[in-house]
Image (cartoon, rainbow, N blue to C red):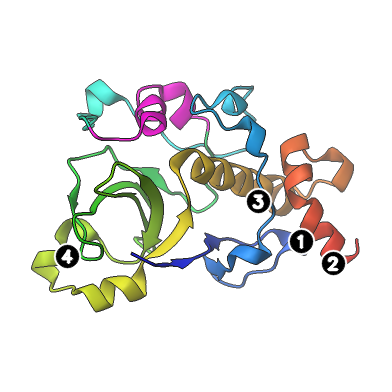
Amino acid sequence: MVLTTGWFGTDLGPYRRDDGTYDYFPPDSLPPLPEPLFDGRFAWLAGARDPRVAYMRPIDVRADGAFLGTGLPDPFVEFMRRPELSGAVPSCTACWWQPPAPPVPSPVGAGARLLRFLNDQQDCLFWYLYLEPDGGHRVVAGGINYDTWVEDGVDEVDAAGDLVEVAPDFERFVYRFWVENLAWFEVVSQERDWDALSPPVRDYLARYRAAVGS
């Protein structure tokens, strides 16, 4: 199934302006990700937590009753089984992890399934694993809760117009979500100068900085 691709992101101060809670950014406008880091184990996420940053509550697989059955991507299972990883991701919009439940059939893509794993605090957006019949996966986001799409009368046309592919896989999604939210806290909330930004944030924002000529 061909979906629109891109990213839903927030304001990043002088580097990327956004007047709403989220805005859509096309893929060619996004900074590249550090591809050599991605091996499914999230080693890049380890490190000290900054007390000035609001981190999401970690997933506790046993307490939350999260569904980690067969057929889910290995990096997703690795992440959800380790609370030190899910608890190391900040959110400037008070998003929260959804304890994974069994996937539901997708209204788009024959045989595909959707597994919701992340929610905006005010239900502006929901993020899902898009599980393909051949075992592949992508990450998609939209404003519809697809756990109830049948009852709510959402059809394929509505869903295709709502869902956006925001990452080609789960680890790359987590990285961009992590670094963009970290950037918001450092740039917008803490008003750090360029040289005081953390190295991942500085590397990520370099393309935006060059574009604005600062």
Element at label 2: helix
> Magenta span covers which residues?
71-88
Q: What amino acid is at disc 1?
A: Tyr
Image position, residue 179 (x, y; %)? 63, 43
Q: Is residue 75 left or right of residue 43?
A: left
Tag 4 residue: 149
Image position, residue 142 (x, y; %)? 36, 64
Q: What amino acid is at disc 4?
A: Trp
Element at label 3: helix
User: Is there a contact, CB below 8 Å, between mark 3 and mark 2?
Assistant: no
Precedes in sequence: disc 4 or disc 3: 4
Task: Inspect this view and state whether residue 159 appears.
Answer: yes
Residue 117 sits inside the magenta stretch: no
> Is 4 rendered above or below residue 192?
below
Q: Nearer the viewer, mark 1 or mark 3?
A: 1
Precedes in sequence: disc 3 or disc 2: 3
User: Is there a contact, CB below 8 Å, between mark 1 and mark 3?
Assistant: no
Tag 1 residue: 15
Precedes in sequence: disc 4 or disc 2: 4
Tag 3 residue: 184
Residue 75 sits inside the magenta stretch: yes
Q: Quadrant of the C terminus?
A: bottom right
Q: Is residue 205 left or right of residue 110?
A: right
Q: What amino acid is at disc 3?
A: Trp
